[in-house]
Image (tube, rainbow, N blue to C red):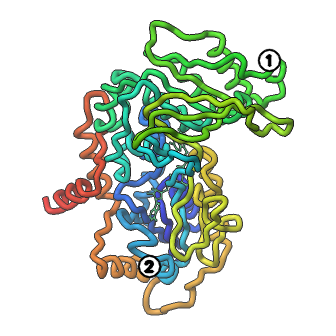
């Protein structure tokens, strides 16, 4: 019997579990441990609330969680409640699938001002992540700036731009929908250091900007290279650029009060303000012969009351796990950290790729584990490996006064969220750990 502790219940954790069940059949027991009582990682707390069809992938993960060989252990933070050494003692293999929850800093003066925040916090706020439920981003200014040229930047802009009616059937939490309904923001700027050819947007996200009820996308014609340069792009990027060119040709639509400007060739220099953000100073850039952004020397200042940086993420280090500071993820060789300790998904490769990218990653991880001898194979003949792992973890947590939650607890939370949803919405999320704990404890008593 092989025992596996997977730390993190996002896509990487679930795809690894799914593949391990397939690769090792009846000879495997898997505990999926998450710091939250709610599973699914960024599917719940990152993917945009108005993209419900993408969130539906969690149904596939449910099938894994309900498998009798799998146990979901929620509300346990590895590295704090239980150490890596303790887990390695109990389980044959420990797989870190902890994602990359921290924003990469901008590294410019003024970043600490109120009203400047990372996309992880901003997205976590509107998605009801307990860490960010109390964020209260300022929405009382006319202008918001979002730094970054990827889909997360577009998600943030779209949520700021949509009407309440457009968000009604999403699972955006009410604590975000209410203030957004009173938002004064009318000019939203998405900024990138390079041009339309280099942007990391995908077609669906760019296309949606043109379908908003009260917002128009704006792009400067002079930011594009000559049209024949588009033929050098691969198909996906060429289509994105086609849509951006269409937006550039359209110009502002006076019937729509909100603008989303895709501002290329700008680099943030510093954020200005007295206590809170009042403006951002920018350097205009251009591409050098190698395709890198270089300064032109021309600077400009844009008044704004909210700055969201969406320039990438870093993994949260865990004590005694080697960390690659430069890349912001666990130091690993093809997923192996040291014998018995592995990493997968964003914790392995950094914050790149889609949900689907984590599937081959999980399959490769499970195959590597299956092909490696069990570390505890000869240990403790009197006790089964399964018991050693499960009972051992339970004993450790009980001794520390930690009450883990299980998958049926999540199912109760899920049902409670669905039951209290506003009209048309799939759920109203519970956003504090206290409320989650109380609900689970109350249900258990009942
Ligand atoms: C804002 C945003 C929007 C996105 N939208 C899309 C989209 O529309 N489509 C798409 O294909 N991809 C999207 N992605 C990318 C996708 O979400 C990622 O590819 C995927 O979630 C990465 O999976 P993961 O399992 O590595 O990490 P995560 O999904 O982050 O899961 C990590 C899990 O580990 C847990 N954890 C962390 N630390 C600990 C610890 N110490 N102890 C216990 N548990 C811990 C966390 O609670 C979390 O549940 C988006 C990403 C972001 C940030």
Q: Quadrant of the C terminus?
A: bottom left
The residue lying at 70 percent from left, 64 percent from top is 334
The residue lying at 27 percent from left, 43 percent from top is 417
On the image, numbered disc 1 is attached to which residue?
Answer: 227
In terms of secondary structure, where does tag 2 sit? helix
The residue lying at 29 percent from left, 38 percent from top is 175
Would you place residue 242 above or below residue 136 in this image?
above
Q: Mark 2 or mark 1, which has the lower sequence index?
A: 1
Q: Nearer the viewer, residue 434 or 236?
A: 434
Residue 385: horizontal and vertical position, in percent? 47, 82
The residue lying at 45 percent from left, 38 percent from top is 273
On the image, numbered disc 2 is attached to which residue?
Answer: 389
Residue 162: quadrant of the picture: top left
Residue 296: horizontal and vertical position, in percent? 75, 32
Q: Is label 2 or label 1 in front?
A: 1
Asked if disc 1 is less than 8 Å from ligand 1, the answer is no
């Amino acid at each position: 019997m092989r025992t596996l502790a997977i730390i993190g219940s996002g896509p990487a954790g679930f795809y690894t579990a799914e593949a391990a069940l397939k690769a090792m059949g009846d000879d495997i027991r898997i505990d999926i441990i998450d710091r939250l009582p709610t599973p699914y990682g960024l599917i719940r707390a990152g993917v945009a609330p108005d993209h419900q069809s993408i969130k539906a992938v969690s149904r596939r993960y449910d099938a894994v969680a309900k498998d009798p060989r799998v146990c979901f252990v929620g509300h346990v933070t590895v590295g704090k409640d239980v150490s890596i050494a303790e887990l390695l003692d109990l389980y044959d293999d420990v797989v870190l699938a902890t994602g990359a929850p921290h924003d990469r800093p901008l590294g410019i003066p003024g970043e600490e001002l109120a009203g400047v925040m990372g996309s992880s916090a901003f997205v976590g706020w509107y998605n009801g992540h307990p860490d960010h439920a109390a964020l209260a981003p300022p929405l009382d200014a006319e202008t918001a700036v979002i730094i970054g040229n990827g889909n997360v930047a577009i998600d943030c802009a779209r949520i700021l731009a949509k009407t309440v009616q457009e968000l009604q059937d999403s699972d955006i939490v009410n604590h975000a929908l209410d203030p957004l309904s009173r938002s004064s923001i009318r000019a939203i700027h998405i900024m990138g250091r390079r041009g339309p050819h280099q942007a990391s947007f995908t077609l669906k996200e760019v296309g949606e900007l043109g379908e908003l009820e009260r917002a128009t996308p704006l792009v400067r014609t002079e930011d594009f290279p000559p049209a024949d340069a588009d033929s050098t792009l691969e198909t996906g990027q060429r289509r994105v650029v086609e849509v951006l060119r269409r937006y550039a040709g359209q110009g502002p639509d006076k019937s729509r009060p909100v603008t989303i400007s895709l501002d290329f060739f700008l680099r943030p220099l510093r954020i200005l303000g007295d206590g809170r953000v009042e403006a951002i100073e920018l350097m205009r850039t251009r591409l050098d012969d190698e395709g890198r952004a270089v300064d032109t020397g021309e600077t400009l200042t844009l008044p704004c009351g909210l700055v969201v940086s969406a320039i990438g993420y870093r993994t949260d280090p865990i004590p005694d796990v080697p960390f690659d500071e430069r890349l912001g993820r666990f130091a690993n060789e093809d997923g192996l950290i040291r014998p018995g300790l592995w990493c997968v998904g964003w914790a392995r490769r950094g914050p790149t790729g889609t949900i689907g990218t984590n599937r081959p990653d999980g399959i490769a991880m499970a195959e590597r584990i299956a092909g490696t001898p069990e570390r505890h194979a000869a240990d403790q003949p009197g006790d089964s490996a399964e018991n050693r792992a499960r009972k051992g973890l339970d004993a450790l947590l009980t001794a520390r006064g930690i009450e883990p939650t299980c998958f049926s607890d999540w199912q109760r939370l899920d049902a409670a969220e669905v039951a209290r949803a506003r009209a048309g919405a799939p759920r109203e999320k519970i956003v504090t750990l206290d409320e989650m704990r109380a609900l689970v404890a109350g249900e258990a008593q009942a």
